[in-house]
Image: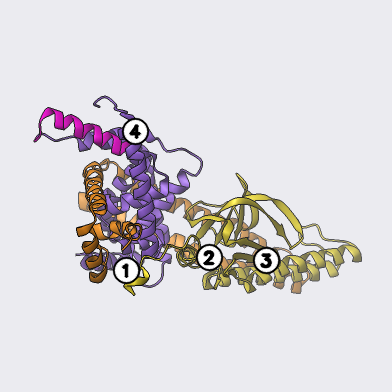
Amino acid sequence: MPCSEVEKLLGAYHDGELDAEQRAHIEEHVRHCPRCAARLEEMDSYAAMILRLCGHHIPPPPEMKPSLFRRLRRQVLRTLAWSLILMLAVIIPLSFAPIFFREDIPRLGRVLLGLSGLTLTIALAPFFYQALRDAGNVIWYHFTADREEE
Amino acid sequence: MKFSYMSPTARFTFGLIIVSLILMSAGLIVIGSRGQHYPGIRMPESIPGWTLFGALMAFILLILVSAFFTQHEVTDREIIIRQGILFHGAIPLDNVASVRETLRKPLGLGVRIGPDRTLFVNTALTNLVVIELKKPQRFKVFHLLPLWEMRRVIINLTEPEAFVRYIHDRIAPPESYRPQSWA
Amino acid sequence: MEGSTQADDATLVARFKRGELRAYEHLFDRYQARIYNYLFRLTGDAELAEDLTQEVFLRVFTEVRKLKGAINFSAWIYRVATNLCYDHFRHRARNQRVTAKIMAQHAISDTSNTPEQRLLRRERAIHMAEALDRLPMHYRTILLLKYAEGMSYRQIGAVLSLSEAAVTSLLHRARMELRRLYSLKEEGGESHAVL
């Protein structure tokens, strides 16, 4: 086998990713090729060096977990707040108010606008529901976590 | 190979929003036809005005509805990006520098130009993929209006990982590692 | 081992999808250190790694429930971490010097050899760390996934959305580039004082 072909597979061989047939071919070649054997040894020392450099695990800061859960709680409550604002302040007044307050507007027009608002509300309801569910889960989690700590 | 950008949930949501817009337009037309107006909304007061309003609403609805019927596509030579009648662009695979999922949060939907000559063609704010181009490329909106030359395009997909993997199998394909003599 | 971990992850993900935040907390405890260290080695900045790690887990919260079917959670979370990192650095250059110093510092805790050998190993560690630092992001990423995270080619492929053949090719190119940069350092005799 030409060295140029073997060289491309040396890494995979070193990493134990070749099948038995490929491994046998590489081993056969390396036995008789000092250049490729040297390459393999070099690869080994590089891998060992990288492992030594990266092998040391740095513990994450202890405040990361409480900080994350605080951020999560803020994010979830913020999403819920925006969903509520959208649902209550925009859609409902736009669509339902005329049905109740403006008798002078043609009924068909009011009905169509009401249906329009209702459809929009249904379209956005899943997001509102999800925001509500998330907020509930997070609040429940914090409530039970606090009680466990006590 | 086609890749969808609208999940069933997105279709449901957008479909209802479109129905809502149609109902709203119909309601406003009914009110306007009686010579009245919905509080806070300025309605046309002449036939040409109403015609323009109707045409505008129809055009907006066409843009929104047409987005349901198109998909992105990857052929042997290019990536075709579509969004209904609003957008159709082709990126030759030769011009793709890289493609990966991105977690950027775009500010809106549709076709927009972002900072640093980034083109957004998205119907959702998540499941985004960024396609970096080797050479800046010019795209058109409505098949007509040219935009500036763009350096990257961000699109959304229902299966972004599958799209990225599909492209990776096509750009810079790996050399064969099984020499003929081993076959 | 990998099989049982994946099964455990799948159970936790299923419980989290049902709304159990405890399961989310367990996932956090399981992956926090790994993701933090991975991001730290990729970015060279402890504070940024902390920020990005938090961002990863915030994405876990919002995105995991939308994933359908069986999820390879480990590959998924590493993919999110990698992409967040790439997004962050799309306009900024990575702080290259910091990583080299910190990584080499941890590698040089070797008391078994002679002082001359220790000095040689120290220099080599610094050169290797600097060479790693100067690698383009995608080469650095794949080398870290392989050697620091100990992933197989299949797992790396799942993280980077590449076929195994493409992983082999990319790793080969990454090693060639690392070799070139390391040789330059060694030949240049560039040696920084002990940290």
Marks 2 and 3 sit apart, C-alpha to C-alpha, by 43 Å
Marks 4 and 3 sit apart, C-alpha to C-alpha, by 67 Å
Question: In the drawing, what numbered circle is on residue A100?
Answer: 3
Question: In the drawing, what numbered circle is on residue B157?
Answer: 2
What crowding class fits label 1: few (fewer than 14 Cα within 10 Å), some (14-19), or many (20 or more)? Answer: some
The residue that label 4 is drawn on is C98
Q: Are marks 4 and 2 on the same chain?
A: no
Q: Please report whichever mark, 1 or 4, sits nearer to the chain's N-terminal start.
A: 1
For the point 60% across and 45% down, which residue is it? B115
The residue that label 1 is drawn on is C14
Residue type pointed to by label 2: Leu
Residue C179 is situated, as x and y percent measured from the top left of the image, at: 33, 44
Magenta residues (range): C112-130
Callout 3: helix, strand or loop? helix
Task: Judge whether residue A135 can be spotted in this image.
Answer: no
Magenta stretch encompasses residue C113: yes
Chain appearing in yellow on the rendered image? B
Is B107 or B27 nearer to us in this picture?
A: B107
Callout 4: helix, strand or loop? helix
* Chain ID at mark 2: B
Q: Are marks 4 and 2 in contact (CB under 8 Å)?
A: no
What crowding class fits label 3: few (fewer than 14 Cα within 10 Å), some (14-19), or many (20 or more)? Answer: few
Chain A drawn in what color?
orange
What crowding class fits label 2: few (fewer than 14 Cα within 10 Å), some (14-19), or many (20 or more)? Answer: many
- Is residue C95 shown left or right of residue C30? right
Marks 1 and 4 sit apart, C-alpha to C-alpha, by 40 Å
